[in-house]
Image (cartoon, rainbow, N blue to C red):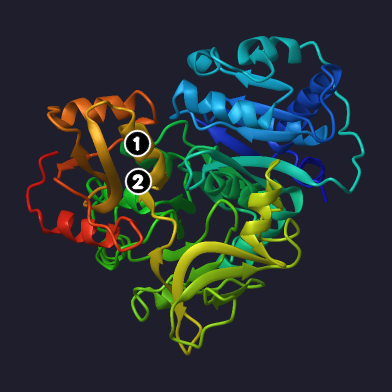
Amino acid sequence: MKAAQYLADVARVRPEHEAVVCGTRRRTYRELARRAEHVCTYLRSRGCGVGDRVALVVENSVEWVELFFGILGCGAVAVPINLRLTGAEVAAILADAQPQLVVCDERHTGLVDAAAGGAVLLLADLERALDAVESAAFPALPSMPDDCLILYTSGTSGAPKGAVITHANVIFIAFQHALEWSLREDERILVTTAFAHRVAIARLFNAVTLGATAVILAHFDVDTALAAFEDERITVAGIVPTIARLLLTRIVPNDPRCASLRTIAATGEAFPVALKRSLLETLPHVRLFSFLAMTEAAGMGTLRPEHQFSHPGSVGRPTLGVEVCLLAPNGSVVPTGEVGEIAVRCGEPGRMAVMRGYFNRPDETAAAFRGDWFLTGDLGRQDEEGFLYVVDRAKDMIVTGGYNVYSREVEDALQLHPAVSDVAVVGVPDDIFGEAVAAFVVLAPSAVVDADVLIAHARERIASYKKPKHVYFVPTLPRNQQGKVLKRVLREQASAVRDPPH
């Protein structure tokens, strides 16, 4: 089943039901499907077809959803761009994806001026062109290839990698969630994060596969979110823990604005037990599902409402239909209770929960799989009851405010400053964002520079959320006999500092 055709089928069954809402913009399923068909027809007239990439440099909006399903309808592959990246970072992604077309809204043309990697079409020009397009049904598409999305995530080397997500992936995960979370066709599901991230795509498909309603926030802020909870009668909200912290600064116990909310789905970073407790004490009627997921593999583990405090440090049991095993460095399965690399399997890659592979990176795809098992790079253990616990991030990834930051790309940016001789970056606890980026810097001989200068230097080269929040100047970095930086020691040093300099 192709996603756009599925939308067309839902539109025949529930034509007048609201499909998407964003601010004052609303579309019924009939309207959404018809507009997506117009996009599809227009893209085909531009030569876009099966396997072609179309990049979206567009804010969360009703128009984004129309574009997305129109792209899928003609067999092309959508490449959503994170609008918080710098122009150089966007250029690197476009150079890798080589899109045939880049659709850009007027507010973000600066991100594609440097290197679009394809023809650039302004969203306003496209909207005018669509008004003249006659409606036509989505064309029949071959069963293979089945690619629908390329979502870019930075690798440990700092180079962007595109995870190829298929139509089968997004539809399977949506039905998996519906079963796990007991979702219904009358849900009103709040999308709180940008569509450049798989969690937002998942919330959209939670709605579309059921014929429910997706309520989209163009940008997250507490006031807008609370207004949406109340005015749009939200029943399901997808959040990251940072959003939970921000909401808790403004809501009161049994807040009437959240009266319709039944289910919270939380992912993106570890969910601290104290934060869970505060959230559920404030909104005791809400069911909380927290789960382990990543761009490459969705829904690996689910911690259900009844286990949030009986197994507080766990990311849950393997989600229905997903197999999990823990591997030793030699590839053998470790005994129960021992630590190993988390590997997941759910049918053939690209068919269910696991991506098909990395776009145009056969070596990295091969390294990420052992047969059908995807190697997550995270270390974990599993108890006798099957509950999974993540004990470390083997790839040194930092999750700040729900955004993934790889330490290597921050280190590379800082290393370009002439005053920096050596640098290592780690994640440290942060009251609001879960983790913050901390840089340990060894200065070059006789060099003098302050932390603000290095933070500004990094911000010019990488997205603002990736820049260091804390900078520590040290004479040397702790290393093992092989010369590898002991980041565990650096995290301990950072945690011991009560009042960090930045």
Looking at the picture, tell me which residue is in the foreground, 79 or 286: 79
Looking at the picture, tell me which residue is in the foreground, 235 or 128: 128
Label 1 crowd bin: few (<14), some (14–19), many (20+), radius 10 Å: some
Left or right: residue 157 compared with residue 477: right
What amino acid does circle 1 point to?
Tyr
**Residue, disc 2:** 401
- State the SS at label 1: helix
| Residue 48 place in picture, x, y as percent | 81, 25
What amino acid does circle 2 point to?
Gly
Which residue occupies 44% across, 73% down?
Answer: 380
- State the SS at label 2: loop
Q: Is residue 198 visible?
A: yes
As drawn, 158 above or below 295 = above
| Residue 412 place in picture, x, y as percent | 38, 36
**Residue, disc 1:** 465
- Tell me whether the residue at label 2 lies in contact with that at label 1, contact meaning CB atoms closer than 8 angstroms: yes
